[in-house]
Amino acid sequence: MGGSDCLYQCQTTNCGYLYDPKRGDRKGKIEKGTSFDDLPEDWKCPVCGAGKKMFKPVPGTGCD
Ligand SMILES: [Zn+2]
């Protein structure tokens, strides 16, 4: 497995929101410690509303 601490960044223009598993997403009712892979498929960026497909892993943050 691995990569549970991996940060994911929203790739939408002008957004740049970072999903941090250690923080979760309070607005989306995601508990701390939830890895990006474990987010619900209908989870959306709390800033711009983009879907999970718009996110990419941030190298060097625990991604494999
Ligand atoms: Zn976004």
Image (tube, rainbow, N blue to C red):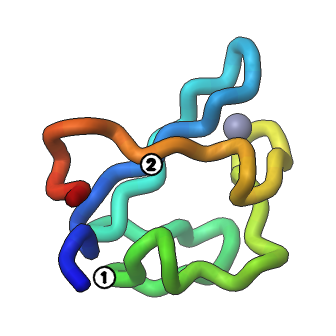
For marks 1 and 2, give the one nearer the viewer: 2
Of the pair 28 and 60, the residue shown nearer to us: 60
Horizontal side of residue 43 vs 22, given as left or right:
right
Q: Residue placed at 68% from the left, 72% from the top?
A: 28
Q: Which mark is residue 46?
A: none
Quarter of the view holding residue 43: bottom right
For the N terminus, the quadrant is bottom left
Residue 64 x, y percent position in the rendering = 21, 59
Q: Quadrant of residue 10?
A: top right
Residue 36, x across and y down, in percent:
47, 69
Point 31% across, 82% down: residue: 33
Disc 2 is placed on an element classified as strand
Residue 41's image quarter?
A: bottom right
Alpha carbon of mark 1 to alpha carbon of mark 2: how far?
14 Å
Q: Quadrant of ligand 1?
A: top right
Q: Amino acid at mark 1?
A: Gly
Q: Residues within 10 Å of mark 2 (few under 14, many from 20)?
A: many
- Which residue is drawn at the image coordinates 39% and 76% (left, top)? 35
From the viewer's perspective, is residue 17 above or below residue 16?
below
Q: Amino acid at mark 2?
A: Tyr
Tell me which residue sits at (34%, 39%) in the image.
58
Question: Where in the figure is residue 62, as x and y percent of width and height?
Answer: 16, 56
Look at mark 1 in the image and give the residue it sits on: 33
Per the image, label 1 sits on a secondary structure element best described as: loop
Relative side of 26 to 13, left or right: left
The tally of labels here is 2
Residue identifier under label 2? 8
